[in-house]
Image: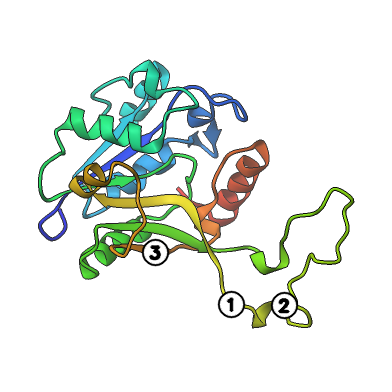
């Protein structure tokens, strides 16, 4: 619990993965990828319940082995490439009967294995301090989008850099942030009312470092996470 809220962590992990097959149970360091998200959620002093939403028996077994609950197997229509995060969250909210006041859901994607329990706790504290409806993790962009643009078919660079950027150093440009997919915290009733994961004046960004926010989508991302785990001796 935190404040008046009961807190449920939801880890969505389907069996199908086209770019990196079976990535949720693939060994990262000495344990499966999904276990890296289960451990900080279980360790958090604020999270009351850790639930994995999956359609896959192996993921179910591995998740339970590392201490998470898997009270259901996700239906097929929520396990394909067209199912949205909100569809998966809504299904879990209904099954777990979280559609009541004072319920928080914390979405932890297993593809962000390096998030820290301290980040989870601080993000939840920020939610309470700001009297928020949602808190979402963000990271500073690796490169300013002001150095980016589209290219015409002929590749001409004449209008590539905006005039206001010319001659400026990177450190003189404003900071930009991006969603990193690591932590989403929402009041469940607000989510159901909006009908989607939403971003409005009651939702606040919570900055996490690039190192702890690695998002695994490709084999290269996986290798990056492995390198960081070895370097930091994360357990």
Q: In the image shown, does 99 or 31 lie closer to the viewer?
A: 99
Neighbours of disc 1 within 10 Å: few (<14), some (14-19), many (20+) = few
Quick check: 94 left or right of 202? left
Q: Which mark is residue 174?
A: 1
Image location (x, y in percent) of residue 115: 44, 53
**Residue at 67% of width from left, 68% of height from top?**
146
Alpha carbon of mark 1 to alpha carbon of mark 3: how far?
A: 18 Å
Quick check: 48 left or right of 63? left
Callout 3 secondary element: strand
Callout 2 secondary element: loop
Callout 1 secondary element: loop
Quick check: 179 left or right of 187? right
Task: Give the residue pinned by disc 3.
Answer: 206
Q: Which mark is residue 165?
A: 2
Marks 1 and 3 in Cβ contact (< 8 Å)? no
Mark 1 vs mark 2: give the one in front: 2
Image location (x, y in percent) of residue 160: 79, 65
Q: In the image shown, does 52 or 162 lie closer to the viewer?
A: 162
Neighbours of disc 2 within 10 Å: few (<14), some (14-19), many (20+) = few
Q: Earlier in the sequence, mark 3 or mark 2?
A: 2
**Residue at 33% of width from left, 18% of height from top?**
75
**Residue at 15% of width from left, 39% of height from top?**
99
Q: In the image shown, does 55 or 45 lie closer to the viewer?
A: 55
Q: Earlier in the sequence, mark 1 or mark 2?
A: 2
Alpha carbon of mark 1 to alpha carbon of mark 2: how far?
A: 11 Å
Image location (x, y in percent) of residue 157: 86, 62
Q: State the image quarter where residue 131 is shown.
A: bottom left
> Does residue 113 appear in this view?
yes
């Amino acid at each position: 619990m935190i404040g008046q809220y009961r807190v449920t962590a939801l880890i969505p992990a389907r069996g199908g993965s086209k770019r990196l097959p079976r990535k949720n149970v693939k060994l990262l360091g000495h344990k499966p990828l999904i276990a890296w998200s289960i451990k900080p959620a279980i360790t958090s002093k604020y999270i009351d319940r850790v639930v994995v939403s999956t359609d896959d028996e192996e993921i179910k077994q591995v998740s339970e082995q590392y201490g998470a609950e898997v009270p259901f197997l996700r239906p097929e229509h929520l396990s394909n490439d067209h199912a949205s995060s909100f569809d998966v969250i809504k299904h879990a909210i209904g099954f777990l009967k979280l559609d009541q006041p004072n319920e928080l859901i914390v979405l932890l994607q297993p593809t962000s294995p390096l998030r820290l329990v301290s980040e989870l706790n601080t993000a939840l504290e920020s939610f309470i301090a700001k009297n928020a409806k949602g808190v979402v993790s963000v990271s500073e962009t690796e490169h300013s989008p002001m150095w980016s643009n589209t290219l015409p078919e002929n590749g001409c660079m004449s209008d590539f850099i905006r005039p206001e950027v010319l001659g400026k150093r990177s450190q003189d440009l404003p900071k930009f942030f991006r969603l990193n997919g690591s932590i989403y915290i929402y009041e469940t009733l607000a989510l159901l009312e909006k009908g989607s994961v939403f971003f409005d004046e009651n939702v606040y960004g919570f900055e996490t470092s690039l190192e702890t926010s690695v998002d695994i989508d490709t084999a290269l991302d996986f290798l990056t996470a492995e390198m960081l785990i070895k370097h930091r001796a994360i357990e």
